[in-house]
Amino acid sequence: MFGGLKRAISKVKEKLATTTLNEKDLDDALWEFEINLIENNVSEEVVRKLIDKIKNELINKKIPRFTKIDEIIDDTFKNLIEEVFQQLPKYDLVKMIKEKQEKPFVIVFLGINGNGKTTSIAKLCYKLKNQYNLKCLLACADTFRAGAIEQLEMHARKLNVEYIKHKYGSSPTAVAYSAVEYAYNKKIDVVLIDTAGRMQTDKNLVDEMKKLIKVIEPDFVILVVDSLTGNDAYYQAEMFEKEIPINGYIVTKVDADEKGGVPLSLIYATKKPILYLGTGSNYEDLIEMDKEWLLKNILK
């Protein structure tokens, strides 16, 4: 996981430790570092900020004797990540669900086909049900894609939770409304609504989703993105955000991501938090992301 990003950082540490710290040699080493970061899906904006911070530390400040260059690089990364996380809204999803007075707490999931949206819904349902003893209801509001209803239905049966479905071609808004109404009457804690995997540029499908959001007024909207799509992950996020307010993200397939730049670049670009990371194919493979996790997996 994130091997490419780790190698890029290790390489620049090694190079800077064995070179004189004049500005030309530093520029050469950091130029190579910049290319390596971009190749590992770190956005150019993040790269530029990081490079500027490193240069400021190494050129414009007096470095105490015996200070290790690798410690300066690590500290610069830590400071950047700390700065990024300070700008993010702080959400405790489980606490929000438990503290909502009038049940249910409604979560709408967005994302294009292939990003692992439906599987992520099932994983979050598993976590809420088994770790926090919350009653969950799944809503099959993807009435467009063949097999979508059956896929969510299969997860509901495996998880032993109730689900609401209509026929293919039905209004997604009607499905979501039925689910919320049912959950309210049955005193179910949380409704997780699956929606059609839509390209962010598909106007008809986006309009349908905007209608669903307006009618249902969900408590939380999660966009699911795929770590393996690289720069397209935050392109998708920005395009969706122009149409529908997003609260946060689930980033999937992180365990298979050899590069590693997507999580940091995503939260930096959008100023929205990543709530969970998908780290495998089992229901248990959904972990919370915080700055300690990110630092651990980038620097070690």
Image (tube, rainbow, N blue to C red):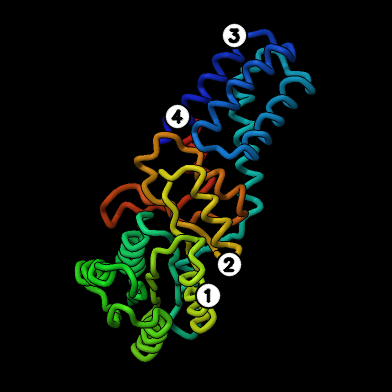
Viewer-proximal residue among 142 and 54 = 142
Helix, strand or loop under label 4: helix
Please tell me how crowded label 3 is: few (under 14), some (14-19), or many (20+) other residues with Cα within 10 Å. few
The alpha-carbon separation of the residues under discs 3 and 1 comes to 56 Å
Labels 2 & 1 near each other (Cβ < 8 A): yes
Point out the frontmost of discs 4 and 3: 4
How far across and how far down the image is residue 107, in percent?
45, 72
Describe the element under mark 3 as helix, strand or loop: loop
Q: Amino acid at mark 3?
A: Thr
Whichever of labels 2 and 3 marks the residue nearer the N terminus, that label is 3
Q: Earlier in the sequence, mark 2 or mark 1?
A: 1
User: Which residue in the protein does label 4 denote?
Assistant: 4
Please say if 53 is above or below 251: above
Q: Is residue 131 above or below residue 287?
A: below
Say which residue label 1 marks: 210
Residue at the spot of label 2: 243
Amino acid carrying label 1: it is: Lys
